[in-house]
Image: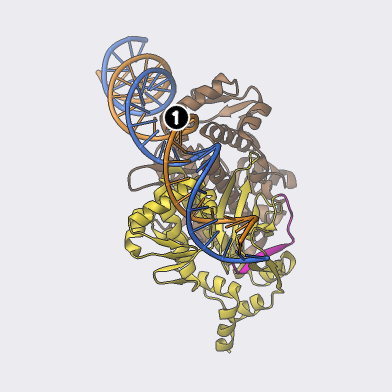
Chain colours: A brown, B yellow, C orange, D blue
Amino acid sequence: MTTALHDQAQSNPLLRKLSGVAELTDKERQAVLALPLSIKVFDADVDVVREGERPSDCSLVVSGFVCRYKILPDGKRQILGFYVPGDIPDLQSLRLHVMDHSVGALVKSTVALIPHQSLQDVLQRQPRLSDILWRVSLIDAAIFREWMIGLGRRSGYQRMAHLLCELQVRLKAIGLAEENGCELPITQNEFADALGLSTVHVNRIIQDLRRDSLIVLRGSVLEIPDWGALCAAAEFDPAYLHLGR
Amino acid sequence: MTTALHDQAQSNPLLRKLSGVAELTDKERQAVLALPLSIKVFDADVDVVREGERPSDCSLVVSGFVCRYKILPDGKRQILGFYVPGDIPDLQSLRLHVMDHSVGALVKSTVALIPHQSLQDVLQRQPRLSDILWRVSLIDAAIFREWMIGLGRRSGYQRMAHLLCELQVRLKAIGLAEENGCELPITQNEFADALGLSTVHVNRIIQDLRRDSLIVLRGSVLEIPDWGALCAAAEFDPAYLHLGR
DNA sequence: CGTACGATTGAGAGACTTCAACAAACGTGG
DNA sequence: CCACGTTTGTTGAAGTCTCTCAATCGTACG
């Protein structure tokens, strides 16, 4: 029986995510698996949720790549985070009713919508799941803080290296990265909006990173020849991802 | 009876904070008031909690001014947020056991330590308080996002104006600001570390803001002659503070 | 009254931006 | 399956914001 549930965990990205945060009881697993999910596919550059909306569901990324972002009055965009399968980029909408930013698909992505109502019901019956989700949103905030540190105090070069380290680690944690690289469907323009830089400068930084043999980036395929060297250049310390239980 | 409890709310900063997020039942109020608080005073520039530690309490600011920050290997500092009476700058430590940054007092501050254990007990008996605290930490994250937007995409001038708007609104919400100004015990050096700028540049930005008659800043006293003008210059929209219930 | 900390000023340097053009890669329809 | 148009990546040059260094000024406090 535990085996059967364990098998489902492989296929259910939410279960996998929560199991990564804390050991679940069988009852909790069942409660999660019983959540009604409505699957929806978003094309690239289509919004999943928009600033100002009051969503009635949370969006669980099943496949693809999604980001949170905000557009300023003058048209500038700041990307606030990247989200991969298993992530819930608008988990906050369960408790903060008005969206203060948007969520958009970077590439064609599959999203499972979880009604707030059914999530509430499950959390009421399994209060520990509520604690786990709280923890998930705190890890989210920890990533924001690390990005703030980069935006405020790191050079463009370091910032880029740091972001690549973060993505590699997060993708590896969900089995979407090889030992020495991963696929990143992120354009240089999107990198720029995430790092607070111009597209042109991001292009030159990538060339610098290539010149220093820290990365091989062809198309959307990232290869990291020397993980230690990249981490060192980025001053990357994965502690903020709070991955280990 | 409700009146008596209400009176206590005035003096108990945690109750006031939580009441600002959601209406509390009498039972919930009593549970909060029953929390054992140990008062501790920190001098200016003394750490309340340090990166790497595993706190056994949460810190509720009772009086003073506190910030979260992280020091980089090269000595640069990024301030991640300012915290005022009623705030719990390390609320996350309840669910994320290792601190990934530090908390320090900007001026002599009084902090009430709440043992994680007793907080856990109260939250287990009053699950709705858990939801409220979750919401509090989500508002925290919303403020991080807004700072990211500033650090990534706003000019130094706008960033400074925006921060002053935020502090004015947050201080007014707890009765620590006048209609047209407030006291900010923050040095230009600290502003710089919060805004991702150099001290020298912050100084020049402040002069620009003064020249444009947007602020009067003498010592630690901030005066805002034209609130609308400052908000406009900052493109400040308080929605991200999620203040209205 | 000296000392220390915070605020202010000047000057030169560097990181990053903007604009504009071009090359390469990609997807799509004929 | 190729031609075409659009998107993405790349390059150069000029300009701007912000930084660093280093000195000076003001003021509160012992």
Residue at x 68% of width, y 52% of height: B99
Residue A245: percent from left, percent from top: 72, 47
Looking at the rendered structure, the secondary structure element under dot 1 is: helix
Residue B224: which quarter of the image? bottom left
Quadrant of image for the N terminus of chain B:
bottom right
Q: Is residue A100 visible?
A: no
View extreme (bottom): residue: B1
Q: Nearer the viewer, residue B14 or D25?
A: D25
The answer to whether residue B182 is left or right of residue A23 is: left
Residue B69: percent from left, percent from top: 61, 51
Residue at x 54% of width, y 33% of height: A160
Q: Is residue B75 visible?
A: yes
Indicate whether residue B63 is drawn in magenta: yes
The answer to whether residue B180 is left or right of residue A160 is: left
Indicate whether residue A158 is drawn in magenta: no
User: What segment is highlighted magenta in the picture?
Assistant: B52-64
Q: Nearer the viewer, residue B159 or A221?
A: B159
Q: Tell me the subunit letter for badge 1.
A: A
Q: At label 1, which amino acid type do we have?
A: His
Residue C27: percent from left, percent from top: 38, 25
Residue at x 49% of width, y 38% of height: A195
10 Å neighbourhood of mark 1: few (<14), some, or many (≥20)? some
Determine which residue is flagged by label 1. Answer: A201
Residue C7: percent from left, percent from top: 48, 55
